[in-house]
Image: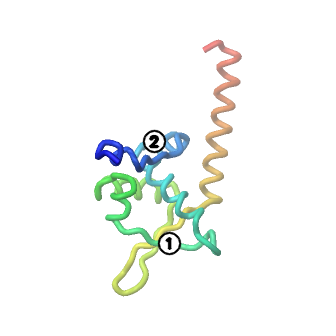
Amino acid sequence: MSAFLKLLDRPIAFHRCFIDLTGSVTAALFLSQAVYWQKRLPEEPDAFWHKNRAEWTDETGLSRREQETARQILKRLGVLEEQRTGVPARLMYRVDHPKLSGLLNTLIDDSQAEDVYQDHTGH
């Protein structure tokens, strides 16, 4: 495989609606990746899981500062929980699915209300 094709081998997708939810492309990317990993927990879908900074950078391309900013936004929204455990301490993550679902439902409701408004006003 050519070097060019190797560079194109690992695309990363993220959920566009998370930009509307968070107001940030980096937070949307971080949340999409967190949801991806949360869904892959074998037996306890609500368990905490670990990913270190280097792994986040490797998977998403986000720098340390971008990761920290994204995490702050997501924690403020209540959709990302963090927990330090072990010796040496490891930062563990969990997506709060009920909170995320509620916020997404609010986005849907707001979007539908906007559609109705536009239909009636023509704008």
* Quadrant position of residue 97: bottom right
Residue in the picture at 56% in, 64% down: 38
CA gap, disc 2 and disc 1: 25 Å
Mark 1 packing: few (<14 Cα in 10 Å), some, or many (20+)?
some
Q: Residue furthest bottom?
A: 87
Q: Position of residue 32 (x, y in %)?
A: 50, 52
Instruction: Decide: is 45 above or below 73.
Output: below
Instruction: Decide: is 103 above or below 108.
Output: below
For the C terminus, the image quarter is top right
Instruction: Decide: is 11 above or below 98.
Output: above
Residue denoted by label 1: 49
Q: Kindly identify which numbered label has been placed on residue 58.
A: none
Q: Residue furthest top?
A: 122
Residue in the picture at 30% in, 42% down: 4
Residue denoted by label 2: 23
Q: Position of residue 105 (x, y in %)?
A: 67, 45
Q: Position of residue 27 (x, y in %)?
A: 43, 50
Question: Which of the marked residues, 2 or 1, is nearer the chain's N terminus?
Answer: 2
Q: Nearer the viewer, residue 32 or 74?
A: 32
